[in-house]
């Protein structure tokens, strides 16, 4: 079932090693089918060079496995919370990509220092707090998702399609799995540049708001004019 979805999610997962966003199997991509409410996600712990489209696991939003011979990614419950709480999200990526995860380990959001960042992500990329001991012991993966959804409540979350989880790693999202991977690549590049920017100038300030606005809104929203038109 949902063969085209599984193929897309497989291909999106295979982009993670291609773009050097993951080491070993530390990452996963999913995409939801809005018709059925089912989503396809990478299986847990299968090596990327052995992965096949048919290995993708089909799940529902209650955490039931609908189809698949493997167990789903261990981060599946986080994906479920994000899909339930942020309904415009159609694809999700989790990685421990090293530059972005360095900011997460430092417990810092990534300020917008330039237009590369502003083109894709509006404002500072947030770093959400650690879960409490109780939250970790009760339901670690689910509560990670609950925390992300809570942070983005009442915000334009498609304008900030990335989050850092303190001492852990990254989640990005998009209008499908491929778009979410694209945002994961942007996040890693922006994280690298921001770190290098601070090394070169420890007193650096975020880019002027008018410049951030110009770059974000020329690519997004009702008056976008970047590219070849739609
Ligand atoms: Zn992780």
Image (spheres, helix red, strand yellow):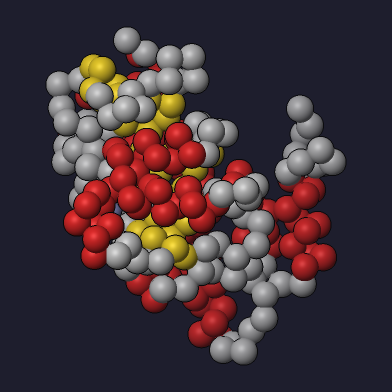
Residue 178 is situated, as x and y percent measured from the top left of the image, at: 48, 35
Q: Quadrant of residue 30?
A: top left
Vertical order, 106 against 171 (above or below):
below
Q: Quadrant of residue 134?
A: bottom left
**Count of number-bearing discs:** 0
Percent x, y of residue 189: 50, 60
| Screen quadrant of the C terminus | top right
Near-viewer residue (112 or 151): 151
**Residue located at (45% from left, 34% from top):** 84
Residue 23 visible in the snapshot: no
- The answer to whether residue 134 is left or right of residue 121 is left
Q: Residue at x 77, y 72 (%)?
A: 208
In the image, 175: left or right of 102? right
Q: Is residue 67 above or below residue 210?
A: above
Pick whichever, 152 or 118, lies toward us. Answer: 152
Decide which of 192, 1 is in the foreground and name it.
1
**Left or right: residue 135 compared with residue 206:** left
Where residue 65 sits in the image (x, y, percent)?
A: 23, 23
Tell me the residue at 79%/32% (across/down). Answer: 229
Residue 4 in the image, given as x and y percentages of width and height: 40, 15
- Asked if one can make out residue 65 in the rendered structure from this viewpoint, the answer is yes
- 217 lies left or right of 165: right
Position of the N terminus, as image quadrant, is top left
Q: Which residue is located at x 67 percent, y 81 percent? A: 205
């Amino acid at each position: 079932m949902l063969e085209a979805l599984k193929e897309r999610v497989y291909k999106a997962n295979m982009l993670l090693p291609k773009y050097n966003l993951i080491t070993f199997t530390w990452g996963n991509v999913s995409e939801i089918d809005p018709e059925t409410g089912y989503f396809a996600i990478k299986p847990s712990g299968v090596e990327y060079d052995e992965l096949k489209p048919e290995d993708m696991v089909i799940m529902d939003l209650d955490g039931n496995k609908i189809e698949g011979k493997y167990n789903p990614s261990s981060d599946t419950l986080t994906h479920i919370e994000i899909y339930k709480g942020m309904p415009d999200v159609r694809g999700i990526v989790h990685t421990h990509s090293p530059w972005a995860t360095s900011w997460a380990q430092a417990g810092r959001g990534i300020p917008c220092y330039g237009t590369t960042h502003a083109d894709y992500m509006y404002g500072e990329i947030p770093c959400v707090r650690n879960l409490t001991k109780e939250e970790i012991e009760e339901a670690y993966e689910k509560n990670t998702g609950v925390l992300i959804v809570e942070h983005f409540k009442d915000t334009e979350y498609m304008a900030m399609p990335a989050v850092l989880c303190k001492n852990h790693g990254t989640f990005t999202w998009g209008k499908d799995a491929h778009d979410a991977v694209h945002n994961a690549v942007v996040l890693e590049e922006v994280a690298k540049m921001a770190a290098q920017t601070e090394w070169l100038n420890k007193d650096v300030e975020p880019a002027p708001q008018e410049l951030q606005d110009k770059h974000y809104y020329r690519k997004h929203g009702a008056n976008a004019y970047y590219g070849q038109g739609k």
